[in-house]
Amino acid sequence: MAMTMSDGLQRIRFPKGISGYIPPPGFAPRATVANARLNELFNLMVLLLTSDSDYFTEVVRNIYGSRRVQKLLGISDDMDAFFCAAILRRFFHIITDKYASYVVIRAMLVFDKKKKYVMYEHLLHHALDIARNQYGCIALNEVITDADDPFYRNLLLDLVARNALCLSNDPSGNFVVQHVLTLYDLRCTHNVAVSLRGHCIDLSFKKYGSYIVKKLLDTEESMAVVVTELLECEGGRLMRLARNEYGSFVVVKALRVTHEMNRVDLFRGLVQKLMPFRHRLLRSHGSNIANMLESTI
């Protein structure tokens, strides 16, 4: 039942002389009577598909329905207007669904600027809840990557950076923080580091949190934030971090990057702080750290 309309879009019996082929985005047909009738028919079918929000949502939540609707996006402004309205009525439910979310991702690529701006506003309004959703975080990452409007792209990056702490501690949200750090946007990376200052050690004890902290070590400015926190923490806590199954990788990378970036002050500071614990690190996840310390003697 859920596929009746989308099936119908593919199986319409057209009058003689009218092709049932769905044109690709940007296709401009000749202004003939037959094509005019075809456009009217498509518009009617799309209107019927999108006028019932429950029905439209049911269709795009189906893997095949989602794929077929994606193919219809970008064909004409009239059809896009129907689809845009339908998506916006159930925006959060659509963008956080495993298959329906791809309809939003595709729409953000092919819609005109006016429709995109309206969708960006909805995205910003729901961004934190989307980021903390299993499928929403994937869709949000895709939209951020593909965003072709610098203003809205920066708004999204700023929102993620401002909320980096709560997102970093969320099972889904942490993937969004990781993603924006892989974009190597120095302004965003700096803002994330500022938001996480004072919390890097706590995050390093956790699997996904440690991934975020390691990414902060990739750029010199944010690296200094992380290493300064390591140097300021109590020695026993740093030792426990170095022995931890996740934290040990953070400490190893901190030693490596401070050496590679020629930050002698930070590298020596870490070595001096860890050296008293090198024997306790040998029979733990910190064995690589112990070996690095031994090589400096």
Image (tube, grey):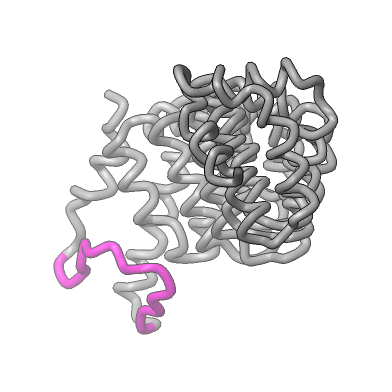
Residue 182 lies, in percent from the top left, at 57, 52
Residue 95 seen in this snapshot: no
Relative to 247, say whether 264 is above or below. below
Residue 135 lies, in percent from the top left, at 48, 30
Between 274 and 33, the one nearer to me in the picture: 274
* Magenta residue span: 16-30
Residue 6 lies, in percent from the top left, at 30, 41
Is 268 on the left or on the right of 255, as rendered?
right
Residue 44 seen in this snapshot: yes
Relative to 267, say whether 279 is above or below. above
Residue lying at the far bottom of the rendered structure: 30
Between 232 and 152, the one nearer to me in the picture: 232
Prevailing SS of the magenta stretch: loop
Please report the residue visible at 36 percent of the width from the left and 79 percent of the height from the top: 29
In the rendered image, which quarter contains the C terminus? top right
Between 147 and 233, the one nearer to me in the picture: 233
In the rendered image, which quarter contains the N terminus? top left
Please report the residue visible at 83 percent of the width from the left and 35 percent of the height from the top: 197
Place residue 126 in its image quadrant: top right
Is 161 on the left or on the right of 10, as rendered?
right
Say if the magenta span includes residue 20.
yes
Relative to 64, say whether 39 is above or below. below
Say if the magenta span includes residue 57.
no
Place residue 231 in its image quadrant: top right
Please report the residue visible at 74 percent of the width from the left and 57 percent of the height from the top: 263
Residue 105 lies, in percent from the top left, at 50, 49
Please report the residue visible at 45 percent of the width from the left and 45 percent of the height from the top: 103
Residue lying at the far left of the rendered structure: 16
Place residue 141 in its image quadrant: top right
